Amino acid sequence: MLPASLTTTFRAFRHRNYRRWATADFVSVTGAWMQNLGLSWLVLTMTGSAGLLGLSFLFQALPRVVLGSWAGAVADRWPARRVLFITQTLHAVLALVLAFIAWTHAPVAGIYAIAVLSGVVSVFDGPTLGRFGSQLVSRDDLGNALSIGSVLSSGGRILGMSLAGAVVSLTGEGWLFLINALSFAAVLYAIWRIRSEAMYPLATSEPENSGALFGLRYVLGNKPMIAVFALSFALSSLGRNYQVTMAAMSEGPLGTGAAGYSVLSVVFAVGTIAGGFLAASRRELTLRILLIMALATSVLQFFSGLAPTLLLFAVVLFPIALGAVVIDTTLTTRIQLDSHEEMRGRVLSAKGMVTASAGAFGGPVLGWLSESFTPGHALELAGLVTTVATVAAWIHLARMPERRSMSPEHRWIHLSPTAQLETAPSATEPPAEQRAPEHGEATHLEEAELGEHPRSTRSERNEAVGSTTG
């Protein structure tokens, strides 16, 4: 029998559908990071310009900002399984086109076109993955599933980049794109094998409430959610763009170059895995945890700018990476559980828009600060800004009239009283006629399965229960 701590940490695996999804998710995340490395290297070798490489990321992010609200409405209205079959297949096709471009040495304009198309597919893929994935586990296990998804995403990132480094030196970038395309077979198979009768259905909107405009009004009218989105923007733009600041610190004050940057990347990746396990070990991910972690990582970021050596910077970087995952997982959990079920796709899409906007804003700002002052001063200033933003958000949430009606035991668990409203029985367990069989029971479907045996665009992508998309 497993220890109680392990039972808590891995409780989402009690759900057979989630086990299937998690396996496919890890395969797809690994393939996606192989493609990410291959794409970056291909653009750099074709253009010799880091600026033109950044342009490809901008092209991929723009559709999320422009089309996010509409995509969320699609996720809440259309059958998730059908949408995912389409989007995941399109991701695979686009990866094959990238392989063709790499093998035929086509112009870089083709890569930019694929970046835009990939962004369009991803913007519809992300919220649908989130809504579909949240139906694979019970409401009580959603936070745990998201946390395990963070661990899988971090592990897939490490494995994918390691494999990509070995493959690209032997075969070139084209094979990385081909491998990623093939990884979508695991996702499509998992979607096909998900058992509908063991899912946890979510409420759906009435036709008059199913549009993008209604979703936008819903989000803008939820002041606690807007407050944490504003905090998330500050943290993501200035406190989470460590790909920029790690490189700047390695080349600048630390003087360690590419070797130092590689070490810091490994430390950061390990920190994200630790953060995923920490979040998974919690029975409930609360608003208080989000605010405490936001304050702690902001203060640590300020002090990271003062680190004189690689070792000290790495020591501070590890808990920052850990906290970043806990913050993101807690935020994604709370906005789903503390809003109405029929709005879930549109709420997740709003979060995706915030994240994409923060990335597009924060990277250039931190780069400019690092060049205009020093990387250390950029980190100090960013840490100071995010500390002030966290304290301001905490005070604002404490003073909100909407939250004063909440009971003291719920005030720093939930975002708003919405979470205390009566929810559909399916939020906790499937309807009796759809309940998954208990141990020892059997169904015709299970008998047929004997002997056979997982957010978001990588979009970032723990918005889904798991982070599948290649």
Image (cartoon, helix red, strand yellow):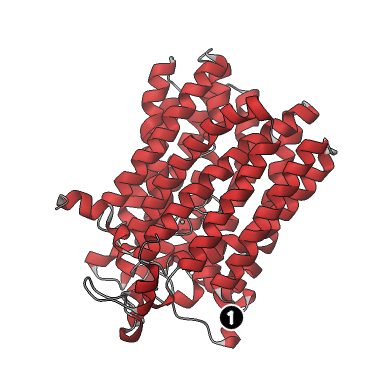
Residue 246 in the image: above or below residue 98 = above
Does residue 350 appear in this view? Answer: no
Residue at x 61%, y 69% (from the top left corner): 83
Residue type at mark 1: give it: Ser
The quadrant holding residue 56 is top right
**Closer to the camera, 421 or 272?**
272
Residue at x 40%, y 48% (from the top left corner): 327
**Closer to the camera, 416 or 54?**
54
Crowding around mark 1 (Cα neighbors within 10 Å: few <14, some 14 to 19, many 20+) is: many
Apparent side of residue 387 relative to residue 66 in the rendered image (left or right):
left
Apparent side of residue 39 relative to residue 423 in the rendered image (left or right):
right
**Closer to the camera, 13 or 409?**
13
Residue 32 in the image: above or below residue 412 = above
Residue 405 drawn at (x, y percent): 31, 73
Total labels: the figure holds: 1
Q: Circle 1 sits on which residue? A: 210
Please tell me whether mark 1 sits on a helix, a strand or a loop.
loop
Residue 193 drawn at (x, y percent): 47, 67
Residue 198 drawn at (x, y percent): 37, 74
Does residue 77 appear in this view? Answer: yes
Residue at x 42%, y 70% (from the top left corner): 135
Residue 14 drawn at (x, y percent): 29, 62
Residue at x 61%, y 59% (from the top left corner): 88
